[in-house]
Image (cartoon, rainbow, N blue to C red):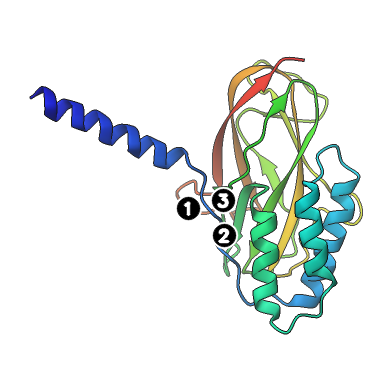
Amino acid sequence: MFRIFFLVQILMFFTVLRIDVQPTLPIVEEVEWAPFREHCRQLLRALDKTTSPLPEQTVYRLTMLLQRNPDDPAATCAAVQKLLDAHCLIAININAESRVKAMRGPAEIQLHQDKPLWTLLKVHNNGGVTHALRLSGSGLVRRGADSTDRWLEAVLMTEAPFTPELTGQRLEYRLLRLIPRQSGKREAVFQFDVGQGTQDLGFRAEVPILFSVRKK
């Protein structure tokens, strides 16, 4: 009996371990190379102005890929995605009916109280939506506000070259700024939509994330 209990505990441990490991995001196919390349160039320029730029090696590899006129644009698009996806906190999928789903990305980030950190969102816009991407959720506070149960400022970059509206392209990446106002282990729920009634049924537009925030 004890051996059975022990084996069950081991299986539960590895099940939890698998859940905690962040997934590799799906590669979006049929992406038009020319506008995607220009979008990624703008993304790199915007990231370079933030307090959380990409690692130098990643930027170098991306720059090399974006300089090419590739013989195989699809393979190059996939290679660019793999480099950027590793730094995405959340991936968003918008289907042909404009329903929005979201999932946790591979990025592992460390927050510090009252210090801004920029991270990436991956947006697979299968519906060609050009409405504004909106963010809300439990634990998220409006810029400059304060609350005991809302502790994390989360703001999408909307300054040039970005706008509040999506481009309508099949794939784009967006910048998200996080500023924690409290320290400790805290959870926030990130909920996305592109207008009234566009959240996916079953609350799949929500992503709860547990953060460990260091003190000042």
Q: In which quarter of the image is the C terminus?
A: top right
**Above or below — where is 60 with respect to 29?**
above
Could you give the CA–CA distance between mark 2 and mark 3, rounded to whole angstroms? 10 Å
Specify few, some or many for label 3: CA neighbours under 10 Å numbering under 14, 14-19, or 20 or more: many
Marks counted in the figure total: 3
Specify few, some or many for label 1: CA neighbours under 10 Å numbering under 14, 14-19, or 20 or more: few
Q: What residue type is labelled 2?
A: Arg
Query: Seen from this angle, which residue lies furthest bottom?
Result: 71
Question: Can the viewer see residue 194 in this picture?
Answer: no
Q: Name the residue under label 2.
A: 99
Residue at 51% in and 50% down: 23
Residue at 45% in and 49% down: 202
Q: Would residue 101 be found to the left or right of residue 178 on screen?
A: left
Q: Which mark is residue 133?
A: none
Could you give the CA–CA distance between mark 2 and mark 1, rounded to whole angstroms? 8 Å
Q: What residue type is labelled 1?
A: Leu
Q: Name the residue under label 1.
A: 201
Residue 90 in the image: state x and y as whole percent: 62, 47
Residue 214 in the image: state x and y as whole percent: 69, 19
As helix, strand or loop, the secondary structure at mark 1 comes to loop
As helix, strand or loop, the secondary structure at mark 3 comes to strand
Q: Quadrant of the N terminus?
A: top left
Could you give the CA–CA distance between mark 1 and mark 3, rounded to whole angstroms? 12 Å
Residue at 67% in and 62% down: 81
